[in-house]
Amino acid sequence: MKLLLNIPDEYITDVLIAALEGGSNYWYNLPDITQARLNFPDKKMATSEKVIRSAMEMRDKIAVYDIEGDSDDAPLGYISRVNIYRGLKLWFERTKSMYHALIFDSGMDAGEADAFFQLVVIGEIVYG
């Protein structure tokens, strides 16, 4: 059976903002978000929203580093539109459960948002 889901970009954006603002901040570092700030100069918009919207709408590729790493280390991965869709695919393949689809309609808690963000950036769940 094949199931097609329509998940609005706003839901995905909200989940990733939840990860950036709380669920994942124990492991990630975003040292260079200059382009995201240039794309969305509105001072009222939170930085996390600028980063996610920059990846989703402007198709930017934002490097994500380990919070404990050195400045010379390679990034863990990237926040990008391509990686976000890869993360969605991996999320739904994890258990093949409708529960995972319904989460996007009802909202995720910080732990679920963190797991999804790791799938987006790294392609697997490594932390927590």
Image: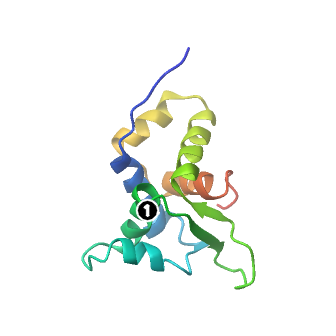
Does residue 60 sit above or below 44 in this rendering? above
Horizontally, residue 89 falls left or right of residue 21, namely: right
Residue at image position (56%, 50%) is 82
Residue at 42% x, 60% y: name it.
58
Question: Which residue corresponds to the image point at 47% horizontal and 67% vertical from the top-left?
Answer: 20
Q: Whole-percent x and y of residue 90? A: 62, 41
Q: Which of the 4 image quarters holds residue 18? A: bottom left
Residue 62 drawn above or below residue 31: above
Q: Left or right: 80 with respect to 65?
A: left
**Could you tell me residue 8's position as x and y percent?**
35, 42
- Write down the residue under mark 1: 52
Q: Hey, what amino acid is under mark 1? A: Ile
Q: Give the SS element for disc 1.
A: helix
Image position of 61 (left or right of 10): right
Residue sitting farthest toward the top: 1
35 left or right, relative to 76: left
Q: Is residue 27 visible?
A: no
**Picture coordinates of residue 35 (x, y %)?**
46, 75
Crowd rating for badge 1 (residues with CA inside 10 Å; few <14, some 14–19, many 20+):
many
Q: Nearer the viewer, residue 85 or 100?
A: 85
User: Do we see residue 55 in this rendering?
Assistant: yes
Q: How many marks?
A: 1
Image quarter hosting the N terminus? top right
Q: Quadrant of the C terminus?
A: bottom right
Residue 115 x/y as whole percent: 57, 53
Residue at coordinates 35% horizontally, 39% vertically from top-left? 105
Residue closer to the observer: 76 or 109:
76
